[in-house]
């Protein structure tokens, strides 16, 4: 009987709750204002030849590299950050090697690492869900071949200091260290300038969040030219579709759209946290476009309820939020995406009603 590799048979599947997502979508950290009008015009301008021809990544890759302040050979466009993670795992992991992650974090790190047959070493955050720097450094061994860090982290929203990231890089010189900066625009700090100092550093960016192009699936993996040269051997020649390639240069050029949206989200994030504090709802300071809060500590009618109670109550009001109760250390927690001012007004009214405050 035909069977897949043991590593695949033994790993858990990732099933994002995407079915039936109607209403106000505050569950997947998407850009709730949509993409730049310039990107949309580029998409609408595509003709039959553009659709029928195989996509050519090179030119747009060069534009992206210039935007990021890097050389072309330091940037590889990918099918979202997911593909970037997958490529790094495939390039540097094998059976018997170790991948190191701090939990809770983005679930695809473990899945892609386990696909290679490598061992995944997980360092659990403490009750404050801050990155466990000291214990993480202690977990680095000669078998560590890959370190995966989301900064800011998802689902906690907390960020790791640049100095601590540098300590990790220095402690693991023979391991690839991938810093996933999917929420960089809402945080403002980056490891990109350190690429020239650390040949084992990779930085990933996505255009799904602040740029509003999640449906087009485009990201960028940045690193040392020599290392990216190796990754280009295994990446599909046509991994980024023509629609994404047509829209990305326009998205990068529309700095005003991104800046305005980010400013609105950051203001909305601070306002939401103030409201949660006023209600007595425990939450974590976030540097992303979302906030993690614990329903078990909520006041009002839902006091002591499961996270699912608030998820259901808001769904009945046409608002979707993400239940993170199953994440390590996140019992009773929900993650809520920050939207526009009007969307946050709607959320605050609905939450106040649901909590019966």
Image (cartoon, helix red, strand yellow):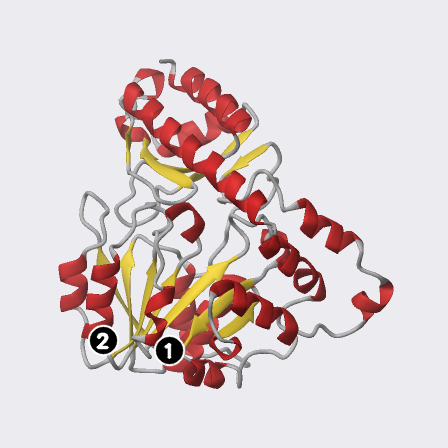
Q: How many marks?
A: 2
Q: Residues within 10 Å of mark 1 (few under 14, many from 20)?
A: many
Mark 2: which secondary structure?
loop
Q: Which residue sits at x=85%, y=68%?
A: 49
Viewer-side label of 1, 2: 2
For residue 76, the mark is: none
Tell me where residue 222 appears, x and y as whole percent: 45, 71
Regarding residue 337, the answer to whether it shows in the image is: no
N-terminal of the pair, mark 1 or mark 2, is 1
Q: Which residue sits at x=50%, y=54%?
A: 15
On screen, residue 254 above or below 22: below
Image quadrant in which the C terminus is located: top left
Mark 1: which secondary structure?
loop
On screen, residue 25 above or below 131: above
Q: Which residue is nearer to you in this view: 1 or 335?
A: 335
Q: Which residue sits at x=55%, y=43%?
A: 31
Q: Quadrant of residue 43?
A: bottom right
Q: Which residue is nearer to you in this view: 195 or 357?
A: 195
**Cβ atoms under marks 1 and 2 closer than 8 Å:** no
The CA distance from mark 1 to mark 2 is 21 Å
Residue 249 falls left or right of residue 148: right
Q: Residues within 10 Å of mark 2 (few under 14, many from 20)?
A: many
Tell me where residue 147 appears, x and y as whole percent: 30, 69
Tell me where residue 307 appears, x and y as whole percent: 37, 33
Q: Which residue is nearer to you in this view: 205 or 261?
A: 261
Q: Which residue is mark 1?
A: 117
Tell me where residue 257 appears, x and y as whole percent: 58, 43
Regarding residue 269, the answer to whether it shows in the image is: yes
Q: Which residue sits at x=32%, y=16%?
A: 300
Q: Which residue is mark 2?
A: 172
């Amino acid at each position: 009987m035909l069977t897949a590799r043991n590593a695949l048979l033994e790993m858990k599947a990732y099933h994002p709750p995407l079915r039936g997502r109607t209403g106000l979508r505050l569950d997947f950290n998407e850009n709730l204002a949509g993409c730049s009008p310039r990107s949309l015009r580029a998409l609408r301008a595509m003709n039959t030849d553009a659709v029928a021809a195989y996509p050519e990544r090179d030119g747009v890759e060069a534009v992206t590299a210039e935007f990021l302040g890097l050389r072309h050979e330091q940037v590889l466009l990918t099918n979202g950050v997911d593909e970037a993670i997958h490529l790094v795992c495939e390039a540097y992991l094998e059976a018997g090697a170790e991948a190191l992650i701090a939990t809770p974090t983005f679930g695809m790190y473990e899945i892609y690492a386990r696909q290679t047959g490598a061992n995944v070493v997980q360092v659990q955050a403490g009750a404050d869900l801050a990155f466990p720097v000291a214990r993480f450094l202690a977990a680095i061994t000669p078998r560590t071949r890959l370190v995966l860090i989301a900064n800011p982290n998802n689902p906690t929203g907390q960020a790791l200091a640049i100095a601590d990231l540098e300590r990790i890089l220095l402690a693991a010189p023979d391991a690839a260290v991938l810093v996933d900066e999917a929420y960089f625009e809402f945080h403002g700090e980056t490891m990109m300038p350190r690429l020239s100092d650390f040949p084992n550093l990779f930085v990933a960016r996505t255009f799904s969040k602040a740029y509003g192009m999640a449906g087009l699936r485009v990201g960028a993996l940045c690193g040392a030219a020599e290392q990216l040269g190796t990754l280009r051997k295994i990446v599909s020649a046509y991994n980024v579709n023509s629609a994404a390639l047509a829209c990305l240069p326009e998205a990068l050029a529309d700095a005003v759209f991104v800046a305005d949206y980010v400013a609105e989200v950051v203001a909305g994030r601070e306002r939401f946290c103030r409201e949660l504090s006023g209600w007595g709802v425990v939450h974590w300071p976030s540097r992303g476009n979302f906030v993690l809060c614990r329903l078990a500590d909520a006041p009002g009618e839902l006091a002591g309820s499961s996270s699912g109670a608030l998820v259901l109550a808001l769904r009945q009001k046409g608002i979707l939020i993400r239940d993170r109760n199953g994440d390590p250390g996140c019992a009773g927690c929900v993650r809520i995406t920050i939207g526009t001012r009007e969307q946050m007004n709607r959320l605050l009214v609905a939450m106040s009603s649901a909590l019966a405050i």
